[in-house]
Image: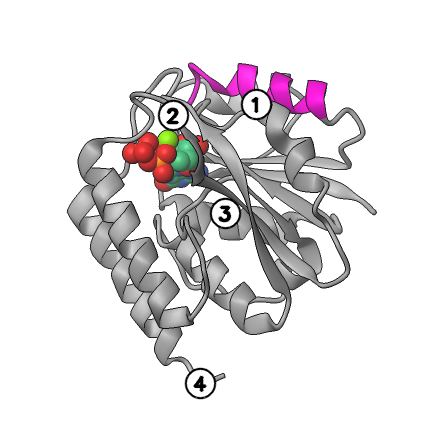
Amino acid sequence: MSLGVVMAAHNEAGSIAAVLQGIRDTVPDLDELIVIDDGSTDDTAALAEAGGATVIRITPNGGKGAAMRRGIAASTSDWLIFLDADGQDDPAEIPTLLEHRAEDVGLINGSRFKGDLRPGSIHPANRVGNVTLTKLFALLFGQAITDSQAGFRILRGELIRGIDLRCVEYEFETEVLARVLRSGYRVLEIPVTRYPRSAGRTDFRRVRNGLRILGTMLRERARPA
Ligand SMILES: Nc1nc2c(ncn2[C@@H]2O[C@H](COP(=O)(O)OP(=O)(O)OP(=O)(O)O)[C@@H](O)[C@H]2O)c(=O)[nH]1
Ligand SMILES: [Mg+2]
């Protein structure tokens, strides 16, 4: 079973080297390590290459979802690991998620809300938005999901490569989760720890991205099976 990482990075020069090192220390037998550098104006791409990644460069910046779609399309591994490039997810927890791979499992979701949200890891307003959107998601899809926007995940490669994703920005996680739930594969949630950013700044815009996530959720619910 081959194993790869697909990671989107926008201006993450302050954290990406340590994140890549953490991944390689934890999973030394990785088959591919893909970083999508999306119009960064810092040294993200060079640092990612120095850290052993295959870097896909996009210009100008087009959003996390669009970047992840490019990375997924370029991937070939049987299982893919998604995590953030800003140090908020701990690569040391990858093996805990990987343990849950099984024939009927499509997605292993690293739930921050089942796990440990460290102080400073989420803005209080984003936390309220996140919990509210997740509750609505769980209601709409009839599933006991606790973190619909989790970025730290393991996915079945063929499954995700076969899905025609449309997301552009941070609605990526919601669209993927909705589609995998519809696929017939099981979704599991495993607690993870979420840390504050180790450097840099978020691109997340609360109102704009919250509305895009809500729109994606409603559209996916309305999609015929
Ligand atoms: N390639 C690419 N990566 C992006 C883009 N926007 C965000 N990312 C990456 O996606 C990951 C998550 O983005 P963040 O902006 O930290 O968002 P977040 O952690 O979900 O939200 P916060 O809680 O506000 O930090 C990071 O690794 C970013 O570098 C983008 O436009 N292009
Ligand atoms: Mg972040």
Specify whether residue 48 is painted magenta.
no
- Quarter of the image for residue 94 reads top right
Task: Report the residue marked by disc 4.
Answer: 224
SS type, badge 1: helix
Task: Report the residue marked by disc 1.
Answer: 48
Given residues 62 and 149, the one toward you in this image is: 149
- Quarter of the image for residue 32 reads top right
The answer for how far apart the CA atoms under marks 3 and 1 are is 16 Å
Task: Report the residue marked by disc 3.
Answer: 68
Of the numbered discs 4 and 2, the one sitting upstream in the chain is 2
Are discs 3 and 2 less than 8 Å apart at CB? no
Side (left or right) of 207 relative to 115 = left
Kind of residue indicated by mark 1: Ala
SS type, badge 3: helix
Side (left or right) of 129 relative to 113 = left
Kind of residue indicated by mark 4: Pro
User: Which residue is farthest bottom?
Assistant: 224
The spot of residue 98 in percent (x, y) is: 70, 40
Kind of residue indicated by mark 3: Met
The spot of residue 2 in percent (x, y) is: 80, 44
* Pointer 2 residue Cβ closer than 8 Å to ligand 1: yes
The answer for how far apart the CA atoms under marks 4 and 3 are is 25 Å
The answer for how far apart the CA atoms under marks 1 and 4 are is 40 Å
The magenta segment is 12-26
Query: Does the image show residue 34?
Result: yes
Above or below, 176 against 57 in this view is below
Point 23% across, 51% down: residue? 210
SS type, badge 4: loop
Of the numbered discs 3 and 1, the one sitting upstream in the chain is 1
* Pointer 3 residue Cβ closer than 8 Å to ligand 1: yes
